Image (cartoon, grey):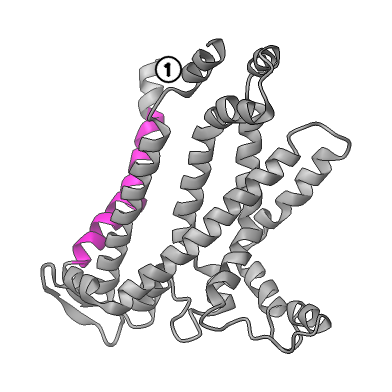
Amino acid sequence: MKDQYLKWLLIIPTVFVLMFWVIYPLLWSLGLSFYEYSIMGTFAVKPVFVGLENYLKVITDPSVWHNFKVTAEFIALAVSLEFLLGFGIAQLLYKEFRGRRIIITLILIPMMLAPIAVGVFYRFIYDSTFGIFTYMLSKVGIPEFRWYTYEWVIPCVALVDVWMWTPFMMLIILAGLTAVPTYLYEAAEIDRASWWMKFRYITLPTIKPLIGIALLFRTMDAFKLFDALFILTDGGPGNASEVISLRIYREAFQYFHTGFASALSYILLVIIIVLTNIYLRFLTRRPVMARVEREVEV
């Protein structure tokens, strides 16, 4: 079989699957966002075209802005902590030592667990009566502590996300550290550069693209927080931890506001696309390696 026929034989099924499973649902949901429509069987209503009304409802609804605010607080807290801890652990594990591979494997275990299982696990840990955190606080003189309050619920949820996904951040940064060419450090040693100078002019610029990719992946994934949060708090107390993905789920599958949920989903999609473009602009701003080599030569 000629190569060009084989190429089309492989491409056509892929295009068909993409069209059926990705493109068609996207276009269908985009169309629904312009309709007043409920997907619920016996309570289903005939779709009524309302134009941009669903989008206007989303923009003018204070509770939706609260959901975006909660989501932003969670992402800022969780992703920044994951980056700092992941960067620190990667620095500790950068040098070879006995048992290094075993330690890395153990650190990666939380990342392999199902979010539902992690949610159940931390629900018991945070329990204000027999949870281990409450027990530890009682030993230092702090009486029964309620974790799921308006002030503490987002940090508690962020801590669960940090426990799960710091290993991912560590893994990406560690891969970047091991890929730094050793001749750059050797040249810096000859010039008697300090640790800070080597970090600032060699390590950081070289691994910056990988840091950007890790932050991009984690930010996009944090927008989709649902499983663990649903088990942990179900958006409570009140709506203190109701992130935007949980609000979309409720509008679509509990209240059956299909059109409103579709409009909310597309606004979230636009926000993620804008953030992704900002990250990509940061990643492709300057050719890193060429600049590093030029600075070392100087």
Q: Position of residue 161 (x, y in %)?
A: 59, 62
Does 33 sit left or right of 66 as displayed? left
Q: Position of residue 239 (x, y in %)?
A: 43, 82
Residue 230 is covered by the magenta coloring: no
The residue shown at (31%, 72%) is 65
Does 148 sit left or right of 190 as displayed? left
Amino acid type at circle 1 is Met
Quarter-wise, where is residue 181 in the image?
Answer: top right
Quarter-wise, where is residue 247 in the image?
Answer: bottom left
Residue 14 is covered by the magenta coloring: yes
Name the residue nearer the viewer: 266 or 233.
233
Outermost residue, right side: 98
Which span is picked out in magenta?
Answer: 9-33
Residue 241 against residue 142 in the figure, above or below = above
Residue 205 against residue 241 in the figure, above or below = above
Does 259 sit left or right of 96 as displayed? left
The residue shown at (27%, 61%) is 267
Residue receiving disc 1: 1
